[in-house]
Image: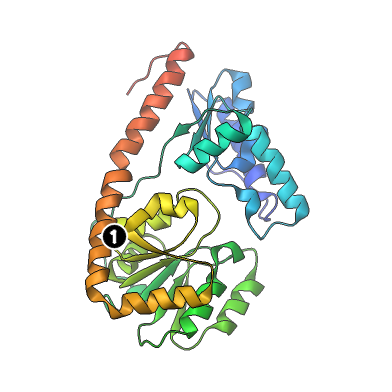
Amino acid sequence: VILPTISRKHFDTAFHTLLSLIHVSFTPADVVFICNVANGPIAWIPRLFGKPTVLNVDGLDRKRKKWNLIGRGSLYFCELLSAITPTRVVTDSRIMQEYYWRRYRRRSAMIAYGAEVPANGAPSKAVDLPSEQFILYVSRLEPENNPELLLDAYRRVQTDWPLVIVGGNAYDAAYVSRLKSLADDRVSFLGPVYGDGYWQLLRKAGLYVFACEVGGVHPALIEAMAAQKPVLYLDTPENHETAGDAGIPFRAKSADLAAQISRLLRNADLRQELSRKAQERAARMFGWEETIQKYESLFSELLAKNGRRSSA
């Protein structure tokens, strides 16, 4: 089902979800699963029609630097309602689970994302790069994801390994242009890359840098771990919960990030050890089978309370 939206930063999510919830309320759906804390104010709509709702709140979106004071205030209001309006709340990390209990006394089901590296697809033109000899960064290009920090750090590193940046920003082309102006000729901006091309980039990368400072468990980080990449990650509680000792943390200082990049580029044995640890941790903590089982259990519980039986 494809529904319209308002393609503006402040309205896209809420408007599209509003239409979607109205639509699904008149379908035979037994449980309605909603993502994003911004949908907290409207997660009650299907409940008026006897349909329990599950809201995955993700991270603390109000902390993103792109929001002005009004935007942050609105998202704080959404966060407050996200603890009230849905039948059940899902958090993707222990840190977020503890936050919702401490702040709102709302219990949540902790269900992490899953990651599984697919089989090799057809070769992609986007992956014409030397195998195991480039640095990869994948993220939406926004300030809280720290692409400027990475570019500044990379300028300090003496290496012939290129830096490949994957991602874009549909709402702020000027910011993307600014980033490109800061890059030297060793940096390649590929824009958004999906599907086989994305996974081929992950497989071929020699080092993965993850610099996001807002959010819970990021799929991009666990996918890099599942693809057996040595990972450098920004030292936040959420990122540390995800990667732990399977990666190397860095402070939000370009000098520290540059030092950690240089350290890994000089030490092939350390890269190999981190690759092994990353794959093992991803398989142990972020397997899709366990994630699916937890959701099935949650949905079945809601169906039973609603007087229905699961067909699973």
Type of colouring: rainbow
Image height check: is 289 above or below 214? above
Looking at the figure, which quarter contains the C terminus? top left
Image height check: is 86 above or below 128? above
Q: What x and y, as percent, mark residue 230?
A: 31, 66
Residue nearest the observer in this picture, 280 or 300: 280
- Residue type at mark 1 is Ala
- On screen, residue 117 versus residue 24, left or right, reads left
- On screen, residue 245 versus residue 36, left or right, reads left
Residue drawn where x is 30% and y is 51% of the image: 282
Q: What x and y, as percent, mark residue 122?
A: 26, 66
Residue drawn where x is 32% and y is 44% of the image: 285
Q: What element carries label 1?
A: loop
Residue drawn where x is 59% and y is 28% of the image: 105
Which residue of the protein is positioned furthest toward the right in this rendering?
A: 70
Q: Is residue 222 visible?
A: no
Q: What x and y, as percent, mark residue 203?
A: 28, 66
Q: Is residue 256 visible?
A: yes
Image height check: is 38 above or below 124? above
Residue nearest the observer in this picture, 131 or 171: 131
Q: Name the residue under label 1.
A: 227
- On screen, residue 144 versus residue 115, left or right, reads right
The picture quadrant where one finds residue 162 is bottom left
Residue drawn where x is 37% and y is 75% of the image: 135
Q: What x and y, as percent, mark residue 33?
A: 50, 33
Q: Few, some or many C-alpha atoms within 10 Å of disc 1 (few <14, some 14-19, many ≥20)? A: many
Which residue of the protein is positioned furthest toward the top in this rendering?
A: 307
Q: How many marks?
A: 1
